[in-house]
Image (cartoon, rainbow, N blue to C red):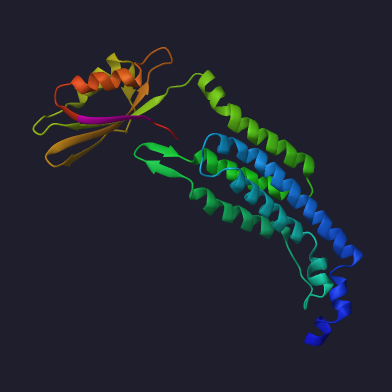
Amino acid sequence: MAVELLSAETLANYWSAPEVTVNLLAFFNILGALLLGLVVGYERTYHGRAAGMRTYGLVCMASAALTVLAGYPGYWYAGHAVTGPTVDPTRIIQGIVTGIGFLGAGVIMREGFSISGLTTAASIWSASAIGILVGIGFYAAAILLTLLSAACMLWGAKLEKWLPSHPALAISITFRSGFVPEEAVLRRTAKQRGYELASGSLTISFAAGRPEWHFIAVRMGLDRGEPMAEIARELAGFEGVESFSIAPARN
């Protein structure tokens, strides 16, 4: 049996005209998916993200490769499979989506009230969908999804800034030992500066004899709310405040 598998005729089947045709088709699909993935990944590279063009290119290319191979089971092993392969392409697509879910989860990071990496995770998922579309031959849809994904990542943030919104700040304050802060005073002080405490965001801890308050302050309007630098300057002079940190509440 092993001798038959290594015979010149069997090996020649791997380079027969039908096999070469299928391989060329797979090659161009993979190459096209790589180029589309690089287009989507450029925006992440431009903004200095950890997942850049290489990540997106690899994800898109691999997704296309796995989808393409599911479409030609009759050509697997040059048509000499021991048992006839029966492949459900939807199961391979499910496997791709599941695998990309783990990859996307790896780029999501949480620090206090701020969550980063959600856009990167979503765009990686989009890149895998582009590869799947290329793999099944929906080239126009793949190109359209590439352009829409790139446009969303390039100009989505500008659109968010243009539309009415309520930016928020994640604030942590450590009070001096013995000082007793009051929530009503905190809310009144925030309102005087154009902010209000987000409902349910206040958390209080006590460490080394010092109370620590953490909360989200939401700007009450685009034309209201003091700049973050001004709030930091005022906090530095407040009675009872020992240390603090302020950062945009990103998600």
Q: Is residue 135 visible?
A: no
Q: Nearer the viewer, residue 162 or 1?
A: 1
Front residue of 84 and 134? 134
Q: Residue furthest top?
A: 223
Q: Residue furthest right?
A: 17
Relative to 36, does residue 187 appear above or below in the rendering?
above
Q: State the image quarter where residue 235 is shown.
A: top left
- Image location of residue 70, percent across then percent down: 75, 60
Which quadrant would the N terminus be assigned to in this image?
bottom right
Picture quadrant where residue 249 is located? top left
Report the front residue among 80 and 8. Answer: 8
Q: Quadrant of the C terminus?
A: top left
Horizontal side of 149 relative to 249 (left or right) equals right
- Which corner quadrant of the image does residue 217 belong to? top left
In magenta segment, residue 216: no
103 lies above or below 251: below
Q: What residue is shown at x 53% (from left), y 18% (from top)?
A: 162
- Across the whole image, how many numbered discs are drawn on residues? 0
Taking 20 as reference, is 196 above or below it? above
Residue found at x 54% / y 41%:
120
Left or right: 242, with 94 as reference point: left
Rendering coords of residue 29 (x, y %): 77, 50
Q: Position of residue 130 (x, y in %)?
A: 69, 45
Residue 55 seen in the current view: yes
Which portion, as a residue range, is magenta? 243-248
The residue drawn where x is 11% and y is 39% is 209
Q: Position of residue 156 (x, y in %)?
A: 57, 28
**Predominant SS along the magenta part:** strand
The residue sitting at 79% across, 65% down in the picture is: 73
226 horizontally vs 26: left or right = left
